[in-house]
Amino acid sequence: MIRIISSLRVNISTPFVLWIPVILVLISLALPLCYLVFRSLGVGSELWELLFRSRTAMIVLRTFILVVSVTLSSVILGVLLGWLTVRTNLYWKSFWSICFVVPLCIPSFVGAFVFVTLFSPKGILQGLLEGVGVDRLPDFIYGFPGSYAVLVLLTFPYAFLIIRAGIRGVDSSFEETSRALGLGPWKTFFTVTLPLLRPSLVSAALVISLYTLSDFGAVSVLGYETFTWAIFLQYESLLGADLAASFSLVLTLFAIAIVLSVYRKEFSDHYHRTAPGVRHQLGVRKLNHWQWCAQGICALVFLASSLLMISVLFNWLFKGISYTDFDLLSFDLIVNSVLVSLLAAVVITILSLATAVFIIRYKGKLARIIDVMSYIGFALPGISVALALTFGFSQFLRPLHQSFLVLFMGYLIIFIAPVVGSIKASLLQINPTLEEAARSLGFSRAKVIWLVTVPLAAPSLISGFATVFLLCIKELPVTLILSPIGFKTLATSSWMAASEAYMTEAALAGLWMIVLASIPVAVLLWIDDRYAPT
Amino acid sequence: MHSIARKMSLLAISASLLALISMACSSEVIKEVPVEVEKVVEVVKEVPVTVEKIVEVEKQVVVEKEVEKDNRTLLVYSGRAEKLVGNLFEQFTEDTGIKVRVKYAKSPALAATLTEEGENSWADLFYSQDPASLEAVSGMFTQIPSSLLSSVPVWAKSSSDNWIGVSGRARVIVHNSNVDPAEMPSDLMGFTDPKWKGRIGWPPTNGSFQAMVTAMRNMWGDYKTKQWLEGIQANDPKVYPKNTPTVAATADEEVDIGFVNHYYLHRFQNEQGMDFNASNHYLSGDGPGSIVLLSGIGVMNHSKNKDLAEAFIAYTLSDQGQKYFMTKTFEHPLVPGTTDDVTGKDCPICEVIPDLNSIGTQTPDYGEQLGDLAATQDLLRIVGLIP
């Protein structure tokens, strides 16, 4: 016992400014897990009966196939687009960067609805092909193909943001050395740049696989039965709150397995220069006659991931305008969405920075436990997290129950993974001797974080902030259950409208979300471009 | 210099005194400075102004007292979308002065939330889209006063009187123009005929659908219900997540008929016009295909605002409330006689919704069916429709 405790002991010199946020994060992440274990205790043999049916095996297999394929595709797309927008002389770089982030604010059920509208056997596409004599499209949208397409198009922005920050942070002297030693550009990319990007790639892969694991919107609309879908059905059926909790616990074990399978020792490797010299970035690569090919790829991705969705939303909007007397959205909704998301983004980015610094710079067992746990919230269905906090606060801290504080805690639990992942990856690219030098010059540990670490990790902080902001704008299950009574956001009212077939209102709220989300992202990416090391 | 300044300040003070201060003070001013008659008139003019001010203050006090007297707010968990009932809450506040704050989410999610919260919930009232969610938390409800219960038909309330139905929706067959209503079977069993192969859409995970299957088990027994489910499955039905996409797919001719609730069609008609490519068919037989499902309200036992909650229930059952359901959400009112004075001019869609009495309304006992929902899901699992 004593040995366990002493092995958990971490560097005592960890400063206070880190301890407080890290403990806060740890408590938040532990809450839903404790709740799920507590609820699962009430489940007996029926769980095992359910788990070991052949149907369950099929669901697990389907989930696995979807997670692997979506993750691989999104990461490849993320590397390609990240490299194009950072390392080449691609025209309209900033414009494309913004375009590639927009899909983050499209809720997956909206994306799936749009896909059905477009590509179902009698959808809009068939309507366009009617003249050519196509009476009915083959039924390819439902099930795996549709779910795969929608999820890739909606999740590749995570990979793009994380990997983009990673590419920004790669010290190009490694690549220059490789080129000087006679390796070609392609070989250098695969043997030097990609391995240097490994922390970003791992973070991106984890984030996307866990998001796919927890997605409900797309798979339910497109009829692909995954594990999360089964959990939601348990909740919907009203009988199995305990059963649903134990299913969620099983999902958590999946998530831990995924995290541990990619979680090797890589975080103890070095991804920064150790010899003297100044970290810098390779000059941009001229695309020459590849320019138009690259533009084509960017345009295609933008078309499929956002433009199609936006135009279908407009289509719903205009269809409805002519028939309903139609009330523009109240200003309150917009203010609510923006304020809550901004505040949540600030809080979560700060806490994530502390957590990431703790994990990378103050290694130890506790750091590793927090590291693995930080991913779990992202894999849990929002409703499980929301009910966990509902139970905890209503029973033990009622004055705080359904307050904004609890809402932020819910956001923290489910959204900390992508931010910590992105910041961790970029911390690995910063040589700790820089921080040690500042320390030796007499700065306190807190001051070193503020004056040295933060500016060096700025790109990842910015991408983390933008990610949380967008995720909060579209978040549903946690907002619905944990927010104070009477509080509404664009996402909640859009979903409410869509689920009752009021497509006009749903479209309007959806378009508002996209507009609102694009502004801060544009500003942030612009800042990022301006102050990036060149 | 000093004296001039003093005179100036005296002037300023006296002027301000004249302008602002009451009669008693101004008499002092008159002693020092010779005042013309006109100025006295000015002072007199000011008197009514101050009187007016006093009146205003008194009014404010009265208003404040009223607010304090009824400063309570009715806190509602609504499983029905804001788009459906938001205006109803607003009307209620307008007509009764009772403030309402609402948390909107899906009914089962709210039932799960209430279960977690227990007595510590902030909610006073749970307004649910379906009876199953109400039954799931019925142990937390208080009795509904019999004066309210008596205004709805006996079947439209819980058997233990702790929740009450306020509006109804009928199960229908939605179909597009490829289907002639004359070729429709009189009974759900008719759709197992091979001529419907590839033409059926259904949402087997949807709560209303499962309620229909539960009713089916009560009327037909498990064996025949299983036969029906397997018969439909042999016809390769398309599976949809819920009612809305089923109706949309029917109109798009992806399928020809769908098993849904009646009002989703009317929402589409309301947004896209009456030429929307689908209609509702009400089955003529009185089997499980023509049951009416309820939305209902329960009052939390721990609530300190039970009187406000009951006021809201009374409002939904009033003529105004019932007409709201009919003309705004296109549901069936439950209080008899509501439909009588609504004309097609007020509500064109109401014209195509048949009267509740003309449907062979089947009225399941929701209290007894709760135990059955588990059995229904077992059955759906056996035939492979849900995991």
Image (cartoon, coloured by chain):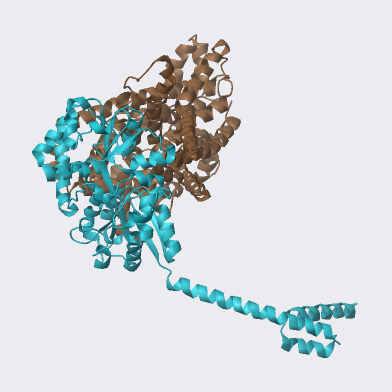
Q: In the depicted view, which residue is nearer to us: B154 or A16?
A: B154
- Taking the image as shown, residue B173 lies to the left or right of residue A460, namely left
Residue at 39% x, 29% y is A117
**What is the x, y in percent for residue A168?**
52, 27
Residue at 51% x, 73% y is B63
Residue A426 visible from this viewpoint: no
Residue A305 location, quadrant: top left
Q: In the depicted view, which residue is nearer to us: A366 or A310?
A: A310
Q: In the depicted view, which residue is nearer to us: A277 or B230?
A: B230
Color used for chain B? cyan
Quarter placement of the C terminus of chain B:
top left
**What is the x, y in percent for residue A160?**
46, 27
Q: In the depicted view, which residue is nearer to us: B171 or A352?
A: B171
Residue B4 location, quadrant: bottom right
- Give the number of callouts: 0
Residue A217 visible from this viewpoint: yes
Quarter placement of the N terminus of chain B:
bottom right
**What is the x, y in percent for residue B20?**
73, 79
In the image, residue B325 above or below residue B252:
below
Residue farthest right in this picture: B1
**What is the x, y in percent for residue B311?**
35, 65
Residue B174 location, quadrant: top left
Residue at 81% x, 82% y is B39
Color used for chain A? brown
